[in-house]
Amino acid sequence: MKDISYHILDIARNSLNAGANLIEISITEHNDTGELILQIRDNGYGMTEDMLKRITDPFFTTSSTKKVGLGLPLLKQNAELTGGCLRIESERNRGTLVTALFHQFHIDMIPEGDLAMTFRSLISSNPESDFLYRHRADEGEFILDTAEIRRELEGISLNAREVLDYITDYIRENLKALKIKEM
Amino acid sequence: MTKIKNLADLRELKDKLQSKTKLRDKSESPDQLVQIKVAMATCCIASGSRETMNYIVDELDKRNIDAVVTQTGCMGYCYAEPTVEVIVPGKEPIVFGYVDAKRADEIIEKYIKGGMLVEGIIPVNYKKIDQ
């Protein structure tokens, strides 16, 4: 995976496959220490303790079409390469929380990538699910809450192109305000 | 410093959208629409399926083609990512491999609009003669 935005898309797809309809994604950046904390929380089926133990094993998967499951192992690898770590907590029928810690000053740190494009593609193909995206940095924070947008738009589908454009611009402009380099 | 934007101008967007007649609920009759499923698992994402999907969504809208674009899991053709399954109403589903923006454009123009087959088909949906 080239950057964090792809990891988010990948892990959020796991959540959707686990039946989640609310996915909370947060990125917190500390300029002084260079720490970046990525959290993805869902309200999906969750995992059994046994699954949880094997989940970062690249040869463990619940899929029937392939023999590998690389999403979480790759995220773990990218976090650990910067001196960070990955933690996964899960409770059956409650949901899963994935937390990755990165050290941004490390030479092996991956870029944050095109976060707006990740949310655009998630929302456009899952307009019924809700995404709560919160990005915090020293300059401030912003929140994208699709539940709020849905309420305001009263019945207009979130995957209308104008809405997707609006959301994309909203994320882009706010990342710029937070002085976050996407690429 | 650029100011952090809030969702204040959403109402404006809503009024604009409601006055447009083309917006209707696509979920009501999905069988009548072209269905496109973009594989979006780890292998697919690493090969650029996010870009392929966003391209397809934008282009279908620009070219006024009614379609439902969804994401799906890994179909097992990791060697040929990004893969896209296209279901044109009344036809058998077809899986295309190596779908970058250029090939996505061909699929929209030639296959969806023109009914012609294009390169990159993964032959998975064949049937035996005696079936």
Image: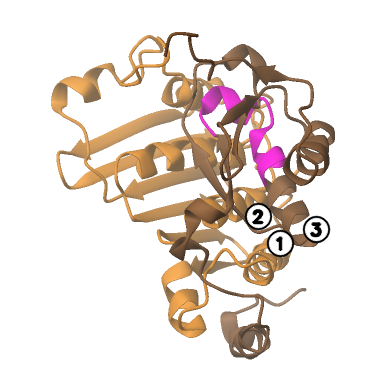
Q: Are marks 2 and 3 on the same chain?
A: no
Which label lies toward us, 1 or 3?
3
Q: Dot 3, crowdedness within 10 Å: few (<14), some or many (≥20)?
A: few
Secondary structure at badge 3 equals loop
Q: CA distance from mark 2 to mark 3?
A: 23 Å
Q: Are marks 1 and 3 on the same chain?
A: no
In the drawing, what numbered circle is on residue B63? 3
The chain letter of the orange chain reads A
Q: Main secondary structure of the magenta part?
A: helix
Secondary structure at badge 1 equals helix
Left or right of residue B95, residue B64 in this image = right
Q: Position of residue A39 (x, y in %)?
A: 42, 46
Write down the chain letter for disc 2. A
The chain letter of the brown chain reads B
Q: CA distance from mark 1 to mark 2?
A: 6 Å
In the drawing, what numbered circle is on residue A172? 1
Q: Are marks 1 and 2 in contact (CB under 8 Å)?
A: yes
Write the start and end of the magenta stretch as one range.
B40-53
Q: Position of residue A152 (x, y in %)?
A: 49, 84
Left or right of residue B122, residue B62 in this image = right
**Image height check: is B53 above or below B8?**
above
Magenta stretch encompasses residue B50: yes
Q: Residue at x 14, y 39 (%)?
A: A92
